[in-house]
Image (cartoon, rainbow, N blue to C red):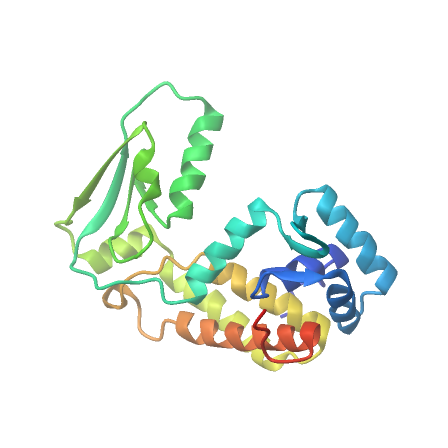
Amino acid sequence: MDDLAPLSARSVMLSLLLGSHPDRMSAAELVRAGEHFGIPPATARVALTRAVAAGDLERAQGDPRQYVLGDRLTARQRRQDEAVLDAETRWDGTWEMAVVVVAGRTGAERATLRDRLSSYRLAELREGVWTRPANLRRPRGYAAEAVLATFTTTPDDDPADLASRLWDLAGWADRGRLLLDGLERTTAPAPRLAVAAQLVRHLATDPLLPAALLPADWPAAAMRTAYAGYQDELRELAFGSPARTS
């Protein structure tokens, strides 16, 4: 994985918490784990202070010795978890659709809506028309947007062909296999963390399509298994045991 740069001290601290369940760690735990990745204790403490100042981390209510993720990264962790855990339900062939029905919005408003719809793993069929298979358990929170009309529909086109036009499935799979191979081959702690961080970011962009619409040998399941194993490694580093129950 020659294209992966080492993570900064701050990124290491954030990655440790993003990969941790429960998602809180003490300064001592973070500093101890950081040393395993070549982060000196003083550098780790500075990184934690700056992460709090930026809103990426917060002091836990009731125990200021503990750090928790800020709102933005909590949402990112939920998205990561959705991609790592089974997020699907039985698919009956229907699709979700959201259509923008209000004109005259600002560029910032359009960009915000695009990001919101993308976060629900919808893809843009044409400008203002977003869709995806209706196979996810998550609620359709975007339906509350006043500028949208939402539908459940069934396309006349072949759904596998439609999916291949909406998402670059071959490209996603190629990148996933490369990252999976990198994680399997990389043993040095800091480079291994960098590969794992890229792998879970890539997983977060998995469209989570029904199996019937995916190419053969789709690597997402193997990537989820590999990342779950890596989370156990992080817990071992931070807490000295494979899992923590409180």
Residue 126 is at least partly visible in this image: no
Judging depth in this view, the residue of 12 and 31 nearest the camera is: 31
Judging depth in this view, the residue of 99 and 166 nearest the camera is: 99
Judging depth in this view, the residue of 215 and 12 nearest the camera is: 12
Query: Could you say which quadrant of the image residue 43 lies in?
Result: bottom right
**Against 174, is 76 above or below?**
above
**Against 92, is 236 above or below?**
below
Toward the right, the furthest residue is 42
Q: Residue at x 21, y 50 (%)?
A: 95
Residue 135 is at least partly visible in this image: yes
**Against 105, is 53 above or below?**
below
- Residue 235, given in percent of the width and then of the height, sits at 63, 73
Quadrant of image for the N terminus: bottom right
- Residue 209, given in percent of the width and then of the height, sits at 30, 60
Query: Could you say which quadrant of the image residue 72 lies in?
Result: top right
Toward the top, the furthest residue is 104
Q: Is residue 76 left or right of residue 49?
A: left
Q: Residue at x 34, y 32 (%)?
A: 145
Q: Is residue 2 left or right of residue 181?
A: right
Toward the front, the furthest residue is 62
- Residue 236, given in percent of the width and then of the height, sits at 65, 78
Q: Is residue 8 left or right of residue 234?
A: right
- Residue 91, given in percent of the width and then of the height, sits at 20, 61
Quadrant of image for the C terminus: bottom right
Q: Residue at x 30, y 52 (%)?
A: 165
Q: Residue at x 20, y 56 (%)?
A: 159
